């Protein structure tokens, strides 16, 4: 699949989003000559319906795909957008000017639904970015739906029942309160952390979905900042904030799609590698460590790792051999710019490892390596301890 989102496009989208916000603020009075707040309730409903549709698309597709990949991250993503979609629906139906929804629609009720949805969304999205993905043996989809309905039902009951006693978040005509701004800044901080985490993961694996998630966090972060400055729920700032939210949800959907698309294609291209009795790996240097960006092979299962769990992990942690740091061999191969082949003892195995220095498409130094189990070919000396690379006579320089 050809990449469509690049680092250059990411920067262009980000800069243009910031420039648009600046231009709107600079020419606010001129834009108000053509902007009619009377149309905003309908426009707001349309924008929110788009976001709700995206939320339920991710939720339903996530439940469907879980049956084949059993991904914890996918299940958490489905739970996130089930709750966010329902609470955003409550927010839309409660918006000032909308018909009666259980109680009279109002600014306070709609704003409380908004802030609850954003807190749940930001916290769960940060968890999705930071937590390592795992395979789940049991089917928790029914439990996910039940918990999502319980959470959204509880939020809806509390806000609708206690609307009159909840603190004010917006004073119509004057703007947002200090409490509202504080909560929006809290959500903004979580979004910023999520943005940094997504970009760091992109730095590690160069996967396109991380750029899409990063771009989504940019737009959602700007959305939260915009919602600290509006004066009325019908004004231009409120409108622009909802437009940015639509873009944020759109890029989440794009990132979700590409992530799942790669998951679908991965078994096709990795079947032959997974059946290989040894290992194939690609390492990238991060600081003083060489970490895996790609690894597969039959031996990986015996090491109790999966290709996904190994991403970003130091090769020395995956193969912690006796008195040997594979990281040192990586530095040696990278230093002399030549292939090296050596043997190590790992548990009850004698492994033959070959490392080759190379350069990836980004111009960065990487190590390409293979591991073969030679235990059945060469006898293993159980009491022999291998030395460091500089003293190890089993290192062979391949010219």
Image (tube, rainbow, N blue to C red):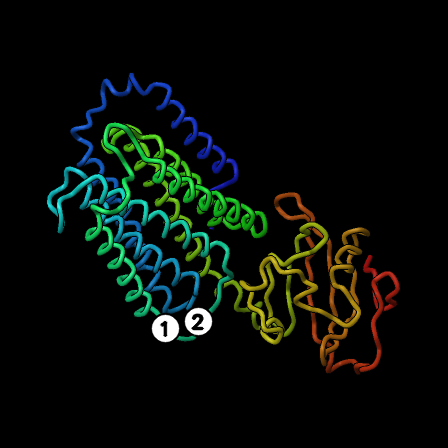
CA–CA distance in space, label 1 to label 2: 7 Å
Q: Secondary structure at mark 1?
A: loop
Question: Disc 1 vs disc 2: Cβ atoms closer than 8 Å?
Answer: yes
Residue 310 falls in which quadrant of the image? bottom right
Residue ID for mark 2: 136
Percent across and percent down for residue 286 are 67, 51
Pointer 1: what residue? 139
Q: Is residue 216 visible?
A: no
Q: Residue at x 68, y 62 (%)?
A: 315
Pointer 2: residues within 10 angstroms few (<14), some, or many (20+)? some
Quarter of image, res 289: bottom right
| Front residue of 306 and 243 | 243
* Left or right of 35 on screen, residue 394: right
Q: Residue 372 lies in what quarter of the image?
A: bottom right
Looking at the rendered structure, which numbered label has been put on residue 115? Answer: none
Q: Is residue 268 left or right of residue 120?
A: right
Counting every numbered tag in the picture gives 2
145 lies above or below 106: below
Q: Is residue 311 left or right of residue 129?
A: right
Using a 10 Å C-alpha cutoff, classify the residue at mark 1 as few (fewer than 14 neighbours), some (14 to 19) or many (20 or more). Answer: few
Counting from the top left corner in percent of width and height, residue 343 is at 78, 70
Please tell me whether mark 2 sits on a helix, a strand or a loop: loop
């Amino acid at each position: 699949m050809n990449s469509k989102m690049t680092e250059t496009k990411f920067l262009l989208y980000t800069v243009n989003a910031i420039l648009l916000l600046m231009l709107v603020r600079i020419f606010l009075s001129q834009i108000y000559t053509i902007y009619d707040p009377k149309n905003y309730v309908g426009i707001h409903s349309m924008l929110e319906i788009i976001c709700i549709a995206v939320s339920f698309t991710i939720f339903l597709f996530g439940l469907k795909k879980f049956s084949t990949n059993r991904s914890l991250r996918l299940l958490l993503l489905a739970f996130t957008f089930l709750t966010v979609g329902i609470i955003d629906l409550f927010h839309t139906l409660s918006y000032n000017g909308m018909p009666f929804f259980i109680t009279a629609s109002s600014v306070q009720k709609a704003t409380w639904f908004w802030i609850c949805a954003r807190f749940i969304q930001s916290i769960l999205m940060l968890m999705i970015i930071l937590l390592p993905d795992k395979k789940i043996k049991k089917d928790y989809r029914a439990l996910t739906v039940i918990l999502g309905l319980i959470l959204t039902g509880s939020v809806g009951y509390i806000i609708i029942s206690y609307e009159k006693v909840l603190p004010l978040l917006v004073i119509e005509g004057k703007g947002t309160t200090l409490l509202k701004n504080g909560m929006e800044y809290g959500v903004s901080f979580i979004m910023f952390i999520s943005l940094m985490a997504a970009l760091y993961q992109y730095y590690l694996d160069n996967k396109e979905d991380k750029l899409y998630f990063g771009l989504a966090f940019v737009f959602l972060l700007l959305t939260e900042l915009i919602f600290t400055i509006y004066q009325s729920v019908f004004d231009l700032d409120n409108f622009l904030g909802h437009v940015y939210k639509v873009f944020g949800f759109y890029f989440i959907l794009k990132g979700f799609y590409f992530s799942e698309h790669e998951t679908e294609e991965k078994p096709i291209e990795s079947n032959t590698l997974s059946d290989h009795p040894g290992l194939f790996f690609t390492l990238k240097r991060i600081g003083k460590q060489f970490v895996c960006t790609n690894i597969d092979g039959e031996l990986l299962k015996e090491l109790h790792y999966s290709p996904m769990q190994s991403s970003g992990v130091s090769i020395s942690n995956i193969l912690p051999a006796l008195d040997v740091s594979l990281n040192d061999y990586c530095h040696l191969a990278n230093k002399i710019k030549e292939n090296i082949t050596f043997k190590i003892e790992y548990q009850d195995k004698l492994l033959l490892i070959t490392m080759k220095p190379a350069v990836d498409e980004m111009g960065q130094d990487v190590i390409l390596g293979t591991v073969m189990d030679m235990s059945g070919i060469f006898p293993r000396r159980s009491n022999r301890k291998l030395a460091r690379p500089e003293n190890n006579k089993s290192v062979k320089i391949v010219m």
